[in-house]
Image: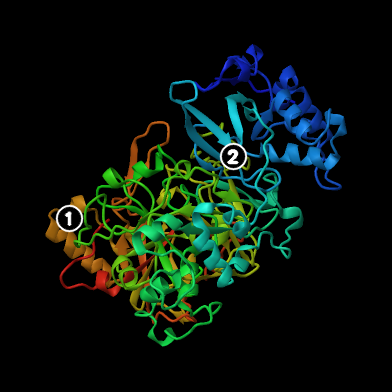
Amino acid sequence: MAVALCVVSAVQFGLVGCSDDPGSDSYYTLTKEYASDYLQNRGQFSEYVQILQRATGAEGKNLRLVDLLGTYGSYTVFAPTNDAIDEFLASKGLSSVAELSKEDCDTIALNSIIEQAFFTTDVSSGPYPKSNMLDQPLTVNSVEDQSSGEVKLAMYINSDARLIHVDDSVCNGVVHTVNKVVFANTDVMIDFMEKDENIQLYCEALRVTHMADSLRKWKDPNYFVGADSIDWTNDKLVLRTATEYDNVAYMENRYYKFTAFVCPDSVLEQKYGVTKVLGKDDPNSLEYLAHQLYDPMYPNDVNNDDLTSRQNALNRFISYHLLDRYGSYYTLTCVDGKDSYLATRWKRTKWDIADWYETMMPYSILKCSFPSGNEEGLYINRRGVQSRPDERGVKVPGAKVTFPDDMGRTNTCLNGIYHYISDVIAYDQQTQQVVLDERLRLDASTLSPDFMTSGARGIYTKSSNVGGKYGHWDATSNHNNVQTCLGFKAGSAKNFIFTDDTHVHVRPRTLSFWSYQGDEVTVIGIFDLTVKLPPVPAGDYELRLFTCIEFDSRGVIQVFIDGLSQGIPFDMRPGGTELFGWKSDASLGDDDAIAAFDKYLHNIKWMKGPKSYTSASNEASKEDGDCFRDTHRTIRKVLGTFTSYGRDDEAHYVRFKQVLETADPKSSALNFDFLEICPRSVYNNEYYSEDKW
């Protein structure tokens, strides 16, 4: 096997003291070591190496972890020292590794490895984007420690195992040294949340409405992919998308995970006087508050006192705080870290980065936004731009989500995550008629909970040593493209209905291509794809598709909304100039001419791309690429209109059918980037023209 030459830097925290130092033999600047060499060459990991040697995984797998960590690939290893292993053995009443069962060795070993490299510069707070080898989440928390008389930084895995030496780069990933054995949290959501003394009212509400029962699912027992599981060497799944090839694999398992937004008991009491859950006529109860919020919107259900009914006010209240997907602080929008380079791609003085999600309350949706400026952070149901009203003079503060490190505890468990929020959220009159009375720009990677729960949305390149955090696309016909994509079988992506001749995968984020938010869902072949639209408040809406065109590998699609054909087929192979006479703003001249041309385009069912987003030339240069309004390759196609009645049993669908007779089953792609659901008050307003952002 060829051995790569790695240049390495070893980083230590100021908190590390002499007793925690893993030894001078850990420090080095140049090595040819793989992770297994690193561990075996340092005596302080000898007991951990014994555990790796005994761990083989589930029956019949024979993982041979030491050998695995000595091969090419990408791994994060949280390596416990011998002292950490001895502490664990003592807690079990054992005196040596030899006394551990094979199952114990499997648990310790597989909990400590993620099959992707993550440095502390990649993830310094919150859950890792990828689960460990037991498919269980690991979370890192950064806290201040003042025990020595000065403020120092400490980082913990799952609030228990402290990182005492970090970021030792090896040829196949990174090794972090920990002072305790790493264990994942195996509680399901409701059991995990009930251990938090700060949120007992919400937990009781989940119980009495039986919504707690919905939070127990974890693994889909009917999902099976066989030989097509995660293996990025399958030549059958190397697919041409534009000028490059995507290397695709499927999930080995399908999981269900959830997100809960929880208002702490202290906030409920302080803001609303709520100290108990039940009591429809008691102003101090959560049930009373729920009726105040929902009775005006649903007058026919005022007397529905069955707490388990989905039309009951308390049931609506608590289920609106739940999502059927995994959403961490840095995945609910595309702001993906404290120093998110992706976030710099937006004109954030004009546009708050936002995404919208269907909640577990029937036919309801909420907004997650991440403004910049003085009010920076993650919010639910906020409207405005930075700290001021938006261009229509609207400002709604929304509920702020607490930063994970400020919660004082781990918020991630086996099948989900919960967040503290500064106020209750509700699908009330203000949310439906004010907050959501705007253009909803729905990234395709958010349209299925499975895209987020699986980690496909925002996934990094398989090898973080190549191409930086956001990777790069190989613009040649290279079948060994390091950019690995996650594919989805029919039936494994909720809200996506497609035929066996349809291939669907989510691409990793790259900033140098014409992809909004850096990623996209790619649909390939003789496809026939139907997507269930997120619910929207009652009203008339226009539906639009944003896509990147002018590639001969694109297809020709016929579009249907709620089963009705929408105009003639859309040929995605020409550019905007050929399709509809695209002209740049610069060539048009003044604002009046630009506005007139925009109106003309909209009348013939076309729009330019948004002005709010600009691609990067490449990640290394940090230079701007193309503003999406200024290139004829990034366009919006007006697909048609539909009417929402806001009913609990309502659903709307858009269908994309490949009609190109010469379509290649391994090419002919639909670049499915985002949908816009735009209310009539925005696209047909006599006082305010629709903004360009």
Question: Residue 75 appears in which quarter of the rendering?
Answer: top right
Position of residue 107 in the picture relative to residue 604 (left or right): right
Position of residue 671 in the picture relative to residue 601 (left or right): right
Residue 242 against residue 503 in the figure, above or below: above
The kind of residue on which mark 2 rests is Val
Residue 271 against residue 433 in the figure, above or below: above
Q: Identify the residue at image location x=48%, y=55%.
A: 552
Residue 232 against residue 593 in the figure, above or below: above
Quarter holding the C terminus is bottom left
How many other residues sit within 10 Å of disc 2, few (<14), some (14-19) or many (≥20)?
many
Q: Residue furthest top?
A: 24
Distance between mark 1 and mark 2 Cα atoms: 42 Å
How far across and how far down the image is residue 216, in percent? 64, 63
* Colouring: rainbow
How far across and how far down the image is residue 301, in percent? 44, 84
| Residue topped by disc 1 | 588
Of marks 1 and 2, which one's residue comes earlier in the chain? 2
Q: In this view of the protein, which residue sits in the foreground, 691 or 391?
A: 391
The kind of residue on which mark 1 rests is Leu
Residue 534 visible in the displayed image? no
Q: How many marks?
A: 2
Of circles 1 and 2, the one toward us is 2
Question: Residue 493 appears in which quarter of the rendering?
Answer: bottom right
Q: In this view of the protein, which residue sits in the foreground, 31 or 308?
A: 308
Residue 261 visible in the displayed image? yes
Q: Which mark is residue 482?
A: 2
